[in-house]
Amino acid sequence: DTEVTQTPKHLVMGMTNKKSLKCEQHMGHRAMYWYKQKAKKPPELMFVYSYEKLSINESVPSRFSPECPNSSLLNLHLHALQPEDSALYLCASSHDVGGGLRYEQYFGPGTRLTVT
Amino acid sequence: GENVEQHPSTLSVQEGDSAVIKCTYSDSASNYFPWYKQELGKGPQLIIDIRSNVGEKKDQRIAVTLNKTAKHFSLHITETQPEDSAVYFCAAMRRTGTASKLTFGTGTRLQVTL
């Protein structure tokens, strides 16, 4: 089973709202990722968590705040977003990070975010 | 950082024909090259991958080749079917400290016509 689940599937929020995206995997993977994907573009890496610690932040604005409560869960907290932040937000996970050999990344279905 | 170029951006083939998508990468430290298929409204699905110590890998109708010297790799789909229609992304992975980073190509929209 290589399933990564994400909720909600769709989210519409105003620029003053606070919302959270959730991601979950039960494959025992120790690395989890957030990507942003604009229409007709490839996914762009935002954050990497390795063993529940933030390993990579790709200079993402602070209005995006990731959180990894445990090895199966990943959240992305959103606050004061701009219309240009509208995109598909993808979560992914992999078994190993860096030094291991099992680093295939499996993606969830994404959350379609619209900022009005 | 890593830069991955992908060609063509669109590809139309007739059902039963073969399709080939090519990618080049810039960072010789990249050592893992997955291919993803993304259907409309869905997340990317890993369909095949290859590691830098392997030159070719095949899984039924799908094959991937890697030329480390030239820093390019290709996806080959034989006997295409309408359900192969999707956007395909190549990617290159390199380690950075305790994490690994995937850099994606720009994508190829494959259309298989009847």
Image (tube, helix red, strand yellow):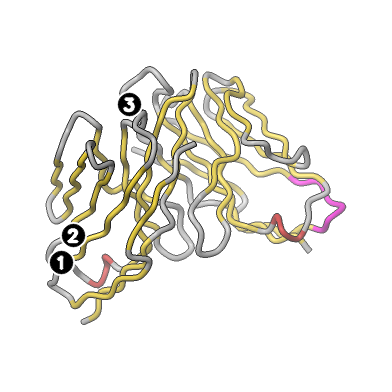
- Specify the amino acid type for callout 2: Ile
Residue A102 picture quarter: top left
- Specify the amino acid type for callout 3: Arg
Q: Residue at x 27, y 68 (%)?
A: B83
Residue topped by disc 2? B77
Q: Is residue B4 above or below residue B39?
A: above
Of callouts 2 and 1, which one flags the residue occurring earlier in the amino acid sequence? Answer: 1
Chain holding disc 1: B
Residue topped by disc 1? B18
Quarter of the image where the N terminus of chain A is located: top left
- Residue found farthest to the bottom: B114
As for residue A49 lying within the magenta part, the answer is no
Range shown magenta: A14-19
Q: Residue at x 24, y 32 (%)?
A: B52
Which mark identifies residue A102?
A: 3
- Specify the amino acid type for callout 1: Ser
As for residue A16 lying within the magenta part, the answer is yes
Sort mark 3 into few (<14), some (14-19) or many (20+) by Cα contacts within 10 Å.
few
Q: Position of residue B19 (x, y in %)?
A: 20, 65
Residue A94 picture quarter: top left
Q: Quick check: A12 left or right of B107?
A: right
